[in-house]
Image (tube, rainbow, N blue to C red):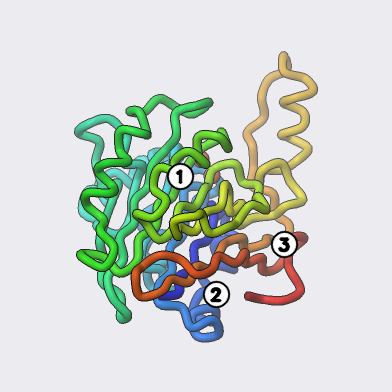
Amino acid sequence: MKVLFLGDIVGRNARNLAQKKIAEFKTQLKLDAIIINVENSAGGFGVTPSICNDFFNAGADVLTTGNHIWDKREIISYISKSDRLLRPMNMIEGTPGLGMTIVRVNAGTIGVANVMTNLFMSRSDPVFDKVPLIIKHLKLTSNVDFSLIDVHGEASSEKMAIGFALDGKVSAVVGTHTHVPTADHQILENGTAYITDVGMSGDYNSIIGMNKNDALKRFMYPDEKKTRLEVSSGEPTLCGVVIETGTNGLSKSIIPLRFGGILEQTTLV
Ligand SMILES: [Fe+2]
Ligand SMILES: [Fe+2]
């Protein structure tokens, strides 16, 4: 299967560009599924029901999130009824919504899990405790043809450790949250595609997607009254990876996709 994963959508411009382009990417790149992290798609903070619907209507199959999932309160009732919008599965017992799902697409069945790491992140259950659950519920060539884990976290070491813990068990482990793409995309030794962070989909003339002057002021003058951070409004780059798997569900390739804006690559995948 061939699957596109796009990193954290930050704000309206990135959202509009992603929604406009994914149908084109689907045809052009012969994609079987599209998975998108949408945790910053509503003005940089959270996601709303109508934004989720727009992404699904545009062609997304599963949406993942992270620590910003609850920033817009109206998402609580929506996520409670959805099997395609995920929140990190290691949030405390009783949290609304799913952290793992299995959905059908034309080419087969895809399993997606969303976890949040523990170092330098808001409090959640130990992420490594979820590794056996993922292995148990998403079985390649058995109940899923493709599986992807969105590891939402700050520390590269922790994300790499999750990658190796799942190597050979899932199709792909992709990192999100730092909003900066890493260049370590690779197929791990047992066949799992891995990247520490796919990067945000947003304006890179910014500080992780937010207006750079406001963000800079906060660092330079920490004692002054904080101004509200606004999404940086320049041309966005869509950042993601395209993963291709073989008949055993393990990966043959992982190729970065960077479309539009400052980080655009001259050749599309
Ligand atoms: Fe994010
Ligand atoms: Fe995040």
Q: Say which element carries label 3.
A: loop
| Disc ID at residue 20 | 2
Look at the picture and state if 163 lies above or below 237. above
Look at the picture and state if 126 lies above or below 156. above
Viewer-nearest of discs 1 and 3: 1
- Disc 1 to disc 2, C-alpha distance: 35 Å
Circle 1 residue: 164
Q: Which residue lies at the image location 64% right of the left edge and 55% below the top edge? A: 202
Q: Residues within 10 Å of mark 1 (few under 14, many from 20)?
A: some
Where in the figure is residue 146, as x and y percent of width and height?
35, 66
Q: Which residue lies at the image location 63% right of the left edge and 33% below the top edge? A: 228
Image-quadrant location for residue 265: bottom right
Circle 3 residue: 235
Where in the figure is residue 4, as x and y percent of width and height?
49, 68
Circles 2, 3 touching at the beta carbon (< 8 Å): no
Q: Earlier in the sequence, mark 1 or mark 2?
A: 2
Q: Quadrant of the N terminus?
A: bottom left
Q: Say which element carries label 2.
A: helix
Q: Which residue lies at the image location 38% right of the left edge and 73% below the top edge? A: 57
The verdict on label 1 being within 8 Å of ligand 2 is no
Where in the figure is residue 19, as x and y percent of width and height?
51, 70
- Disc 2 to disc 3, C-alpha distance: 14 Å
Q: Which residue lies at the image location 37% right of the left edge and 47% below the top edge? A: 114
Give the side of residue 248 with respect to residue 47, left or right.
left
Q: Earlier in the sequence, mark 1 or mark 3?
A: 1
Say which amino acid is labelled 3.
Answer: Glu
Say which amino acid is labelled 1.
Answer: Phe
- Disc 1 to disc 3, C-alpha distance: 35 Å
Q: Residues within 10 Å of mark 3 (few under 14, many from 20)?
A: some
